[in-house]
Structure formats: structure tokens, C-alpha cells
Amino acid sequence: MKKNKILLIALIGAIAGSMLTITVLPLINGLPIIGGGNGGAQTTINVPEENTENVYKAVIKKAMPSVVGITTVVDVGNLFTGPMQQTGIGTGVIIDAKGMILTNSHVIQDGEAKDVTVLFDDGSKSKAEILWSDKTLDLAMIKVNKAGLQVAELGDSDKVEVGDMAIAIGNPLGLEFQRSVTEGIISGLERTIQTDANTTMDNLIQTSAAINPGNSGGPLLNSKGQVIGINTAKASTGEGLGFAIPINTAKPIVNQFIETGAFQKVTLGIQGIDAQYYEQATGIETGADSGVFVAKIDADSVAFKSGLMVNDVIVKMDNAKIEQMQDLVKYLYTVKKGDTVKAQVLREGKKVDLEFAF
């Protein structure tokens, strides 16, 4: 399925009830058939009626204490302007009672922020330490020296469907509007966006819930108050076009931080480039429509020991299709030391199966 790319500005309990019957008319060329002919069969959909207002209130009550405001200070001065500082505002989600908070990498200036302060639901503030950030994923982990915090419940973003309820909490346009709540639906899945000339983000959740500067790093919630995404961007033109990183992308990182207090990324030990870009730049065909062209292999690396060779094109890791370098980078975040991953490469146009032992 071809994915549309949109130029963006980076930012930034079930209720039982009676049954509601909805009649959906068959369509021809997008227009409903009303009467006529033999009156073809109508499709009847039965869905449980919910008190939407109560669902919103329950979600907000559950999730709000685990949402924090984040302010940052970064040095931006140069030789001509002299020392200068720039402040920023974003949002975060508490993922550990001992003080670990998940947010966007761009909220903490991709790890360059010199001062990070967290504002909690009870009005208290704490200085935070940057533990980790990754610009490619646009995710970061910070930590405060505070215990007994209310932890957000993480959902399963793989189960999200278009049309599901979506609720966003964040600090749009500054702390004077802190913990603002917006609502909408899941508008699309597996979206690919371009945040600047050299950066794309893929597999994103699209939502109609309003996402504004300051919402970055905040939670996108489902009707159970579970975090299904981390809000990250909105369209530079148009309204109701917000995007969130699926929470399942962050889970391997979150789990490792909770278990060990740190995140150790595994490495394959290669220098690679998108196969399509390599062909365009060199005019040399790789024999692959997509994948990662292996330009160099480090000695004694995981890749070297597996039998991977220079000029191979990595096209699959386990069941995950690898179309570009970004796919490989993201996949490796799900791998831990001690794991063995089956891989498929193209070598002179032929498929070769390998195993990477990390």
C-alpha cells in the first residue's frame, strides 16, 4: 500500500447501556439508494450506546495525574549575538512511579537542553535529568528525583482502529493553557510524514484531536484511558491533522528503562544506505526495489559473524520488512542483547537467509 507523505511542522471504563441500532444504506457512486427497484437488503449494525460525556470524564480523571508539563532552556547564542538562551514547552507521560517520564526528543532539544523542569498535576515542580533521546524516533526519557508518582497505563497501539475515540492532553501554546484536553477520533493508521527536507517519520497514528505546539510528548488516549500514542506533530496546513507515535514503538525502550534504569541499544555493525538512494547516486543496480545496501561491515561485529557481506541488501528482519535505513534503525530498538534475529538479504539478486546473534 502506497503511503502518502505530508509536509509537517514538528511540535511541538466501558459503560454498559442499551443497544442503538443504526441503518446504513447501500451506496452507488457515493450516493445512498433510497427506495426503488426491489429495495435491496439493508445492512443493520448494532452497537452499544455509550454515554460519551461520562467516558471523557472517566478518561481524564484516570490519565490527568500522569501527564506533566515540561519546560526547557537551551543555549542558542553564537559569536555574533553573544550568549543567548531559548525556552521551550512540551508535555510528558509518567511511565514509572520512581520518576521516569516519556516525551518527545524535540521537546528536550534532542538532548541539548541544559535545564529541564517538570510541572506535576498537583502544582509542584522538579528538575529533571535527561537519560536518553533519539531524534529518529523522536522519543526521549527524562527522570525526576520524586517517588510515588501515578503511572500512566499503556495500551496496545496494534489494536487501534480507524474511528476509535481519541483524547489528547497537553500544554498547547504554553503553560497558561496547561493540561488542555481535546477529543476526536483515530483518522488513519500507518501514516508517513516529512518533518523537514531530510527527515521522515512513518507508521504514525493520525487523529482529528487538536494537536498544537506544547502538546508534543503528551499522551493520545483511548476510551479506557490507556496511552496509545505520544503526540508528536501536526500538519502545517489544514486543521484536524495531528500525528502520534504508536506506544508500541516506545514499549521496548520503556520496559528496559523500568527493568534496568537504562537503555542499551544493540548494534549490527554496518554502514548502510537506502538501496534506492544508492542506485540513484551511483547508477549501480542493487537488484532490490527497496532495503538497506551494506556499504561497510565492522570487524568482529554481529553482522560480520553472521556472514553478511558488503553489497548485500537487507530486506527483512524476522517478519519485519526493511525498506529503508530508518526501518532497520527502528527495528533494532526492539532487539535486546542475547536475542537471535532471522534476516533475509539479497545477494546478487538472490535471497539469502542469515541469523544475527546479538
Image (cartoon, rainbow, N blue to C red):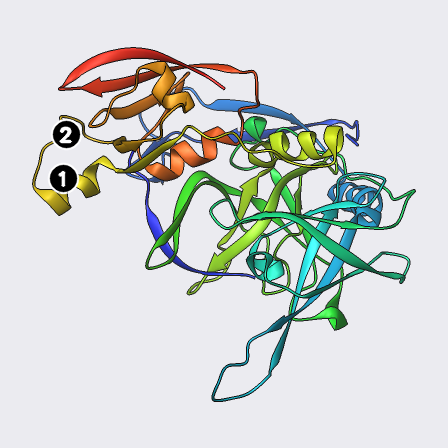
Q: Which mark is residue 51?
A: none
- Give the vertical position of 305 relative to 83 (above or below): above
Residue 39 visible in the picture: no
Image side of residue 328 versus residue 207, left or right? left
* Amino acid marked by disc 1: Glu
Q: Is residue 284 above or below residue 357?
A: below
> What residue does disc 1 label?
279
* Percent coordinates x, y for residue 98 in the rendering: 85, 41
Q: Are marks 2 and 1 in contact (CB under 8 Å)?
A: yes
Give the SS element for disc 1: helix
Identify the residue shown where x is 73% and y is 30%. 260
Percent of width and height locating residue 133 = 59, 48
Q: Quadrant of residue 149?
A: top right
Q: Who is closer to the viewer here, 271 or 158?
A: 271
Q: Residue furthest front?
A: 299
Between the C-alphas of marks 2 and 1, the distance is 7 Å
- Earlier-in-chain disc, 2 versus 1: 1
Quadrant hosting residue 261: top right
Left or right? Give the position of 160 relative to 13.
left
Task: State the residue position of label 2.
Answer: 286
Give the residue type at disc 2.
Answer: Thr
Instruction: Indicate whether 83 appears above or below 169.
Output: below
| Residue 101, position as x, y percentages in the image | 73, 47
Label 1 neighbourhood size at 10 Å, few (<14), some (14-19), many (20+)? some
Mark 2 crowd level (few <14, some 14–19, many ≥20, 10 Å Cα): many
Q: Nearer the viewer, residue 294 or 233?
A: 294
Which residue: 58% across, 31% down? Answer: 248
